[in-house]
Amino acid sequence: MKRLTTGLADLDMILGGGLIPGSVVLLAGPPGSGKTILAQQICFNRATAEHKAVYYTTLSEPHSKLVEHLEEFPFFDPGGLDSRVEYVHLGDMLRDTDDLAPLIDEVVRKALDDEPALVVIDSTKMLADFVSGQALRTALYDLTSRVAHSGAVLLLLGEYTPEEMLTGAESSLADGIVQLAYQSREPVDRRTLRVVKMRGTTHLDGAHTVQITTDGFQVFPRVESFVTDDVPPGAGRVPTGLPGLDALMGGGIPNADATLVLGPSGVGKTVGCLNYLVEGLSRGEHCLYVTFQDTTDQLTRLAEEFGWDLTAARDEDRLMISHVPVGELELDVVAAVIRHRLAGGGVTRIVIDSLAEMAHAAREAERFPAYLRSLLGLVRAAGASLWVTSETRTFGPMEEPLVGLMFLFHNVVQIRYIEHCAEVGRVLNVLKMRHSRHDNGVHACHITDDGLAVGDRLDHLTGVLGWTVLRDCPGESCVTD
């Protein structure tokens, strides 16, 4: 079936491929949710001189103010006003009459004569202030059925609540309903988009994250909505780039596995991430690094301390570093960054630093298990390997930070601090590898000129399972105090 693209690839995906010509779509949401910006962005994205977009306003803000608000967005084309996007004010037809027939006739006449690709009425809910419920239903039926013959998409905007959409005439007549929502929360408020119904298509369910930036309206599909095929175990091993670690893991990480690296702050997790990343780049691979604390410049400078040049790889588009500030972190935005990079092809290594920040900052604890499962499935389906860090307690016995979720990872590596005589050192051990043999010992771990490196096995330890402080007791029996 032929579709009218919105000009927003991810929105088209959510809608099942775009908007169906001749359909009626209700775009509902409270003030500030982004209805008007989205409608006008679609108009400027898709309108042409042959098939323009006609934007009708009822008793909303004047056209001069609408245009003024659009000037900051890159999709706005002042040269396209009237020639591609035409604004028509219907207020004069409403002030002195309680009959909507003249208004309906005017909209239908223009749709049939001009053959626009898109007709927008902003807002239809306001029409209920001028006629009875029965008259409104009759007028809307007349409008939707007649405009459908023109082949134009009829987009009806309104500040409808979820309760009003259950009984409103607009909802029953619409082929599709797209609901925008606005949620107040700290530190950043959240907008979402949900397709309530869309006749003749298979849309993506769920509430999808929306952001309105200087680039305009952006939507990020909910990763749980994607159905990924089961991925058979990958062939071969992926070298980690951490000196000494591959020997403990049977020659490296099985291809397309998800690996979790646990450790407290400052223990070397980020340095280990860079080891893993640089190893891939040295082999000509394409990599993605998602970070919530260190900026791109900070990571680049840290890599330079070990003699690793990330700038060249970035210039060649073999490396993308995506910094998402914790205060602005949205789960769907992170997933979209990864999905788009994978869609570009060739990405074999993905680093997320760190998972604990994702779980806490996103403020969606109930959703997180399903989200993480879907995200890992998305990466594996693309044949890429995932390296993820997560924070543990710095002082005292180690706790399990991802209770009930560690089973999602094929491999788990733990880095810990250790009391070694009068010094604090580091140790590393491989907690698990699914379907693969590995070394069960605890090994010394150091940050060297080559990054994070694994050393000799330590045989005299107490507190290995976290029951007490981890201590190295050479020459003494391993007895807990």
Image (cartoon, grey):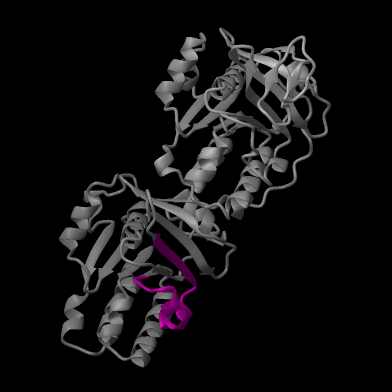
Q: Residue at x 71, y 33 (%)?
A: 467
Quick check: 179 left or right of 63?
A: right
Residue 280 position, x and y percent, is: 62, 20
Instruction: Out of 142 and 210, give the one closest to the viewer.
Output: 210
For residue 64, what is the image quadrant? bottom left
Tell me where the magenta segment starts and ends, as one range: 157-182
Instruction: Out of 84 and 89, give the one closest to the viewer.
Output: 89
Quick check: 478 left or right of 321?
A: right
The quarter of the image holding the N terminus is: bottom right
Q: Does the magenta segment cover residue 268?
A: no
For residue 130, what is the image quadrant? bottom left
Instruction: Out of 421 and 402, give the one closest to the viewer.
Output: 421
The quarter of the image holding the C terminus is: top right
Q: Does the magenta segment cover residue 174?
A: yes
Q: Is residue 351 above or below residue 90?
A: above
Residue 29 position, x and y percent, is: 38, 67
Q: Residue at x 58, y 65 (%)?
A: 201
In the displayed image of the protein, which residue is found farthest to the front? 481
Residue 18 position, x and y percent, is: 49, 58
Q: Is residue 362 above or below residue 107?
A: above
Q: Is residue 346 visible?
A: no
For residue 478, what is the image quadrant? top right
Q: Is residue 329 visible?
A: yes
Residue 418 position, x and y percent, is: 64, 20
Q: Residue at x 75, y 45 (%)?
A: 230
Q: How many marks?
A: 0
